[in-house]
Amino acid sequence: VGLGRSVNGAPVIAERIGEPGGRPVLVIGVIHGNEDDGVAIVDRLRDDPAPDGVELWLVESMNPDGQGAQLRQNANGVDLNRNFPYRWGSIGVPGDPQYAGVGPASEPETQAIVNFIGQLRPEIVIWYHQDLFIISPAEGREGRVRSRYAELTNWPMGGITGGTYTGVAATWARHELAPDDGVAFIVELGPTLSAEEAERHADAVRIVGAE
């Protein structure tokens, strides 16, 4: 399914694996273009059927221009993970690593994902980043899903600091999906991802999606 196009015209695509009408689970492999090891996890999720009762949606990359150039930002120099409309804040200028854009959801890639999540209403959304090798804890159902994912992948849990966290994709999605008790979180991969680790993450997505 075509969701939209990037600044440079590359398609942003979502692929469905599994039953239409099942529990919707969304995985986004790349948001920062130079953090693209999540593609290996998406590849493995394509290899096998989704669990019974799960409608698995895969967006290999929501930042194809940045990924192609191996840059964090999109082709407008915007950090897409500071561009989402919930609690957006003006950060920096073009060229700054966390430049948030001219306004909330100013970028076509952000708009594509905002529209898709608004229509799909997934129960779980996962974004992959690098390379802090961590998952942040949380409360309630969100916390239980994150903890279960960490357990399944043997990934550590802990707080993430060091940035200005306005306009963040997962925070927007949690707010957007709150009426449906939806879960949205970031998995920080390490500097590298082995084939075994990619398979373990793919298995974890299938398991938490089915549970």
Image: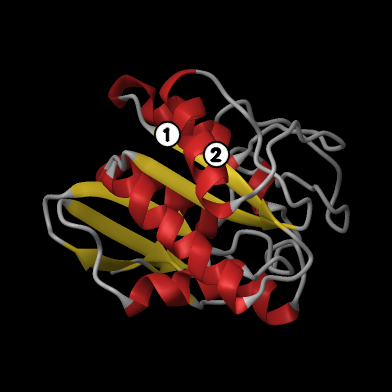
* Of 54 and 64, the residue lying toward us: 54
Mark 1 crowdedness (10 Å alpha carbons): few <14, some 14-19, many ≥20: many
- 19 with respect to 203 (left or right): left
The correct choice, above or below, for 130 with respect to 144 in the image is: below
The front one of 117 and 141 is 141
The residue under the point 46% across, 28% down is 144
Q: Is residue 40 left or right of residue 124?
A: right
Q: Which residue is mark 1?
A: 183
Q: Amino acid at mark 1?
A: Val
- Please provide percent x and percent y for residue 59: 43, 65
Number of residues whose C-alpha sits closer than 10 Å to that of mark 2, classed few (under 14), some (14–19) or many (20 or more): some
Left or right: where 147 falls relative to 66 = left
Residue 75: % across, % down: 69, 69
User: Tag 2: residue type?
Assistant: Ala
The front one of 92 and 43 is: 43
User: Which corner quadrant of the image does residue 63 belong to?
Assistant: bottom right
**Can residue 128 be seen from the camera position used here?**
yes
